[in-house]
Amino acid sequence: TKMHYNDPKMNANYQGDEQLTEADRLLATLREKESSGQYNVVNEYGYVGAYQFGAQRLQDLGLVKKGATNKDLTNPDVWTGKYGVTSREMFLNRPDVQDAVALKHLAMLEKQLAGSATSKKDLVGKIFAAHLLGVNGSKNLSNVDANSTSGLDYYKLGASLVSEPEIKPKNSYISNMAKNVEADLSTFTTDAADAIADAMGKFGSEAYKFLTGKKFTKD
């Protein structure tokens, strides 16, 4: 099978290919909602990348030093160098890093929310709402962000990705995926084509592992 990073099947609405894993769909859907799938965007409030992370969350993820604000992200000195990312510009041009830390971010939310979820569908809905509003803000789904987008909108989007509701979700639904991706990412360099090819074979998710943003293929 041959697929490209920019393959139409990466569209979040595409549901017909078994090669698209749950992680692929989670990330593709969130990317489309946050940035129309663009990795190199910065919004008017200084949130960056495909998943629109702010300085606070980037600190939680280990990429930015404590105390930094969104305005500070233009200063290379506030970046920790984790995963080889030493500036905002480099972060914006590293889809591999953005995808991996987004999955880690979702796993962190999962850990906080799994205890209150009634099903897998409910859990993913809550995770998406918390991405928008934070864990506390998402407790009231009528809350909105600075763009007047409600937690309920994101809850419905996340829940729509799960076709089989469970009585009680497993805490490791996203966490295990994130651990594998981060472990591999720690070996990546800026010139990562070979490592990416290895990762594709190791984890078997072609769509998700096309991390360079180039027309990179895997036969």
Image (cartoon, rainbow, N blue to C red):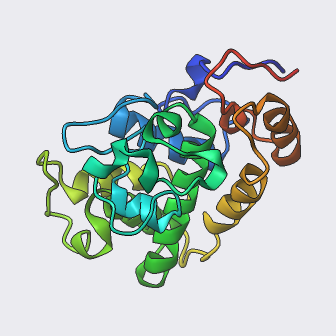
* Quadrant of the image containing the C terminus: top right
Can you name the residue that lies furthest to the front here? 77
> In the picture shown, does residue 134 fall above or below 206?
below
| Closest to the observer, 65 or 152 | 65
Total tally of numbered discs in the picture: 0
| Image x and y of residue 167, in percent | 53, 77
Q: Residue furthest bottom?
A: 115
Q: Residue at x 33, y 61 (%)?
A: 68
Q: Is residue 182 visible?
A: yes
Q: Quadrant of the N terminus?
A: top right
Q: Quadrant of residue 99?
A: top right
Question: Is 12 or 73 nearer to us in this picture?
Answer: 73
Residue in the picture at 25% in, 36% down: 43
Apparent side of residue 14 relative to residue 137 in the rendered image (left or right) = right
Report which quarter residue 19 is drawn in: top right
Q: Which residue is painted at 28% across and 57% down in the image?
A: 69
At horizontal 43% and vertical 29% (from top left) the residue drawn is 40
Residue 199 % position (x, y): 82, 42
219 with respect to 44 (left or right): right
Give the image location of residue 107, x and y in percent.
55, 66
- In this rendering, position of residue 149 left or right of residue 136: left
Instruction: Give how far across and how far down residue 177 sits, in percent.
Output: 69, 59
Question: 186 above or below 112?
Answer: above
Q: Residue furthest top?
A: 215
The answer to whether residue 163 shows anywhere in this view is no
- Residue 208: image quadrant is top right
Q: Is residue 19 above or below residue 21?
A: above
